[in-house]
Amino acid sequence: MNSNNKKPVAIRAFAPASVGNAGPGFDLLGHTVSGVGDRVIVSRIEEPTVRIDAISGCVTNLPLDAAHNTAGKALLSLREHLQLSHGFALEIEKGIPLGSGLGGSAASCVAALVAANALLFEPQSRQALYRHALAGEAVASGSAHGDNVGCMLLGGLVLASADRLMSIPVPDELYCVVVHPHQILETRRAREVLQGTYLLSDVVNQSGNLAQLILGCYEQDWDLIQAGLCDAVVEPRRAPLIPGFRRVRQAALDHGALGGSISGAGPSVFAWFRGALAAQNAAPAMQQAFSDAGFASEVYVGPVAGPAAEVESCNS
């Protein structure tokens, strides 16, 4: 990088929340959520390191050591891969609670990468940033899965393999309701219950659901989308960890949902609807179902083709 070229010295970026593990797409399929997210300010510094100067917002007790922080680890990976001579300083503003099932660990990671990338003399593509987002995400969850970071990088519904992101087109009128109850379910705990064996018939069923869902999105076939939006493998093991889950999903179905399941590792619950009005009408009933189970909640309604992470401002 030529340090004589004029570039901003600080960039603020925003990354939206996400629905990970969308239906049958465990660790593979996710989409972004409008209305909530994380912000990160990244400054270029002369020291060849990554440091975290401040953490604010709804979560503040995160590691300041970059190697143990999702945002810090992602930028360490970026620096090493590009062999940068300079470093980065971060200020993280958390808008997504951890343990919410809304991609909280991924959002700060992606926001940091998008901001740091804008400071580079030769910015990388979003696809190229993916490997570094995976490195950051693994710090929080213990595994490098891309369903959350992938959709934040590209926006909308994204299929994330081990080394590639694929945007999945969806009908414009496909909307999502996500209800976040005031519960905490740590990702590592939610992954522990998935250990063990699975019936081959369930795995085959899950594969068929994922294929129908993706094909339905491409073909804008509502029957296929509805048939595929079903988790036959992960949801049965995680549902008992979320008080009120079945009530909330049933409330969504009673109000015309195509289907619904656990958002990410939970405890948030999502449902897809045909049209904004249907989603808006169902949202209060889904919230009420959590309330009946004893939990207050927040609700977010927006298109499945949600926003990507973006630069908000720069300081020269």
Image: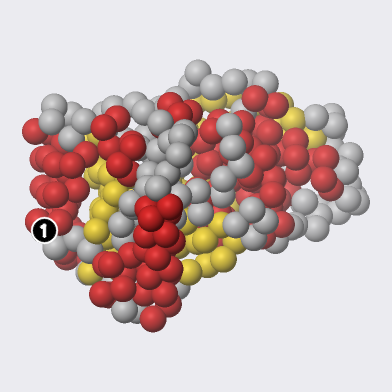
Asked whether 74 or 262 is in front, the reply is 262
Q: Quadrant of residue 171?
A: bottom left
Give the residue furthest to the top. 61
Q: Does 225 sit above or below residue 115?
A: below
Image coordinates of residue 19 in percent, x first then y, are 39, 49
Figure coloring: secondary structure
Which residue is depicted at the point 19% across and 60% down? 257
Asked whether 268 or 280 is in front, the reply is 268
Which residue is depicted at the point 19% across and 48% down? 249
Look at the numbered disc 1 and give the secondary structure of its residue: loop
Left or right placement of residue 33 versus residue 177 in this view: right
Image coordinates of residue 156 in percent, x first then y, are 45, 62
Left or right placement of residue 147 versus residue 278 in this view: right
Residue labelled with disc 1: 255
Image coordinates of residue 153 in percent, x first then y, are 57, 55
Which residue is depicted at the point 86% across and 43% down? 84
Looking at the picture, which amino acid does disc 1 mark? His
